[in-house]
Image (cartoon, rainbow, N blue to C red):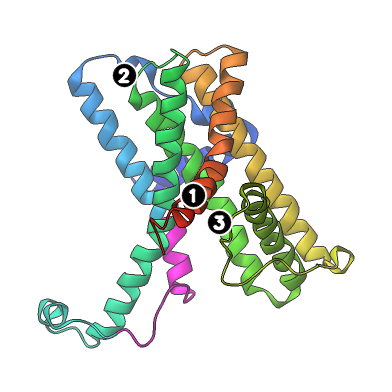
């Protein structure tokens, strides 16, 4: 059983890099075979996502990301933990694990909603399970890889300049919409500082290249999902891809407008 699972993981990683078409292709026959198979496939997708989420979030948490050393365990948890030697440490670990898992999960849910809305609007939807399959696999591989690489940049002393460059790009992207809307909204950390790109280390260059690769693979998997799993044309698949790519911009614009209208403080 364990050998089969390991072989499946290795095969999945191989497909994710060398055969993305096969990696994101859904089990169309099973999804259309009635409610029993539909329920089975929903359960299988949930297991795939949870396992991959754990593979992403647990190492981050063990590395101390998200752990608040001052967070004391509530009394109900101490009672529930019973004879555990240190319920406070366990509470801090579980809290950080939830926090680290939530970021990827929220990104996956927002992508799923935006993606499926685009498929519906272009009249190419073959069912939400087809979308869920695409998002589950592409998120657990490419988006999780993207987040992990960003985390690595922030932790390594030899990639400080590369990390600053990534942060600067993110800030520039946000301030582009702030300036375009003429809003007084500002980030707590202020506008991006100038980054000497020539000072990026070789290691930083490799990580940046891997980041670009993850982004391209992620977008390509979204396109393949529309083409293969929903039977969309090339043009429609491109429109769906644009909708997914526009999601961060729409989120930023919505946040800025909410601030301008005093909906959020």
Residue 20 seen in the current view? no
| Span of residues in magenta | 55-71
The residue under the point 67% across, 74% down is 156
Question: To which residue does mark 1 refer?
Answer: 257
Q: CA distance from mark 2 to mark 3?
A: 32 Å
Picture quadrant of residue 246 = top right
Q: Is residue 156 above or below residue 257?
A: below
- Per the image, the residue denoted by label 3 is 147
* Residue 147 belongs to the span the image colors magenta: no
Q: Secondary structure at mark 1?
A: helix
Left or right, 210 with reference to 228:
right
How far apart are the alpha carbons under marks 1 and 2?
Answer: 43 Å
Q: Which mark is residue 30?
A: 2
Percent across and percent down for residue 16 are: 57, 37
On the image, which quarter does residue 75 sit in?
A: bottom left
Q: Is residue 164 above or below residue 206?
A: below
| Lateral position of residue 201 relative to residue 83, left or right | right
Instruction: Please provide percent x and percent y for residue 67.
Output: 41, 77
Which mark, by number, is residue 103?
none
Characterize the local packing of mark 2: few (<14), some (14-19) or many (20 or more) Cα atoms within 10 angstroms. some
């Amino acid at each position: 059983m364990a050998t089969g699972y390991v072989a499946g993981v290795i095969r999945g990683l191989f497909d994710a890099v060398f055969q993305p078409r096969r990696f994101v292709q859904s089990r169309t026959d099973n999804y259309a075979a009635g409610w029993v198979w539909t329920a089975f496939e929903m359960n299988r997708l949930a297991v795939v996502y949870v396992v991959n989420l754990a593979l992403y979030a647990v190492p981050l948490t063990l590395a101390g990301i998200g752990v608040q050393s001052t967070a004391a365990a509530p009394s109900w948890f101490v009672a529930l933990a019973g004879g555990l030697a240190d319920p406070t440490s366990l509470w801090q670990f579980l809290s950080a694990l939830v926090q680290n898992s939530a970021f990827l999960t929220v990104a996956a849910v927002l992508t799923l909603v935006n993606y499926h809305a685009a498929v519906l609007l272009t009249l190419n939807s073959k069912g939400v399970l087809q979308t869920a399959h695409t998002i589950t696999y592409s998120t657990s591989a490419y988006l999780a890889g993207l987040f992990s690489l960003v985390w690595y940049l922030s932790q390594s002393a030899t990639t400080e300049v590369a990390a600053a460059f990534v942060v600067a790009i993110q800030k520039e992207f946000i301030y582009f919409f702030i300036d375009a809307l003429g809003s007084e909204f500002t980030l707590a950390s202020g506008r991006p500082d100038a980054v000497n790109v020539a000072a990026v280390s070789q290691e930083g260059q490799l990580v940046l290249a891997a980041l670009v690769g993850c982004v391209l693979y992620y977008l390509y998997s979204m396109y393949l999902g529309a083409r293969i799993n929903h039977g969309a044309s090339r043009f429609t698949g491109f429109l769906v891809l644009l909708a997914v790519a526009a999601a961060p911009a729409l989120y930023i614009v919505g946040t800025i407008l909410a601030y301008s209208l005093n909906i959020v403080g």
